[in-house]
Structures are given as C-alpha cells and as structure tokens.
Image: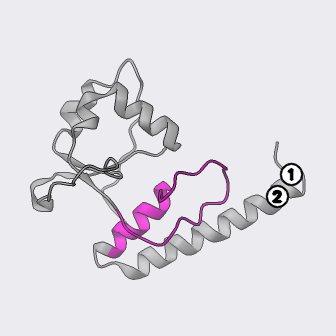
Amino acid sequence: MCSDVHATTWHRLKNQPLASQFGDYCLIYPHSAGADAPPINEEAYAGYLWIDSTWQQSQKMLSQSPWLRHLPRKTMQGPASGYKLRRNQKEGGLSTLESLAYWLEAEKRPAAAKELLQFFHIFQDAFLKARLAGLLK
C-alpha cells in the first residue's frame, strides 16, 4: 500500500532530536479552532506526519514539543468518525486510521482508502464482540 512508512516513538523528555528528522514534514492534524489555516504547498514537504495517540495525548505532545506545534498542518475531511472503541471522542476528530484513509482518497487512491476503512470497521466489530464475550481484559 505505502512503501515508505516509518514509525518513531515520541518521548516527552527526548523528542527534540525528532525536530531535525521531521522538520520539513507536514503534520496531519486539525487546525486550532478559530485559527485560519494557511495554505500549504504540498510539494515543499518531505512527507507527512501522523500522531497515533488519544486526542488528550496528542495535545500534550504538541504542548511539550514546540517544533511539532509549529509544523504546517493539513486537516483531512471526511464524514463523522466511526470510531467506537473509546468514549470522550473529540467533536469532529478522526482516528489515525480514518485520517490515513481520507489522505489516501485525496492522493487519488480510493481503492486503498476503501480497503482500509473496511478493515477499520471489521476490526472494531470483532473487538467489541470479544469484549462483550469477556475475552478481553
């Protein structure tokens, strides 16, 4: 699906070296409420960066990482989130997987986006059934 994907662990006290690694990336993340999003030149970025965490954790990461907070942002638009595994979801927020699927759509890869969203819904349904059956702790 995507051949150049990398995972990196963020640590609140040791995240500054990531600034040089990802300083020329665009962050896939909602713009601040009330703030106008500056237009972005997508050809100017080395890649895209997703934060895979809860909304509360991602907000802490932004507040503790000035370099991350100042990256240009691209917001993915899609229907309301279909994420069912946690309460306290952010209004208008998407899960990491959903934002990736909508990014794939924007990149003219609708089949990959559809497949990813199908997996997302199948996984959630299976997880919730297993939880209800007492198979998960």
Residue depicted at 60% across the width and 61% down the height:
83
As drawn, is 117 to the left or to the right of 7?
A: right
- Label 2 sits on residue: 130
Name the colour scheme: one colour
Quadrant of res 106: bottom left
Q: Residue furthest bottom?
A: 111
- Label 1 sits on residue: 135
Q: Position of residue 27 (x, y in %)?
A: 28, 49
Helix, strand, or loop for circle 1? loop
Q: Is residue 80 magenta?
A: yes
Q: CA distance from mark 1 to mark 2?
A: 5 Å
Near mark 2 (Cα within 10 A), the count class, few <14, some 14-19 or many ≥20, is: few
Q: Position of residue 121 (x, y in %)?
A: 63, 70
Q: Quadrant of the N terminus?
A: bottom left
Helix, strand, or loop for circle 2? helix
Residue depicted at 11% across the width and 61% down the height:
43
Q: What range of the chain is rendered magenta?
A: 76-105
For residue 1, the mark is none
Residue depicted at 22% across the width and 42% down the height:
71
Dot placed on the residue nearer the N-terminal end, 1 or 2? 2
Q: Position of residue 119 (x, y in %)?
A: 58, 70
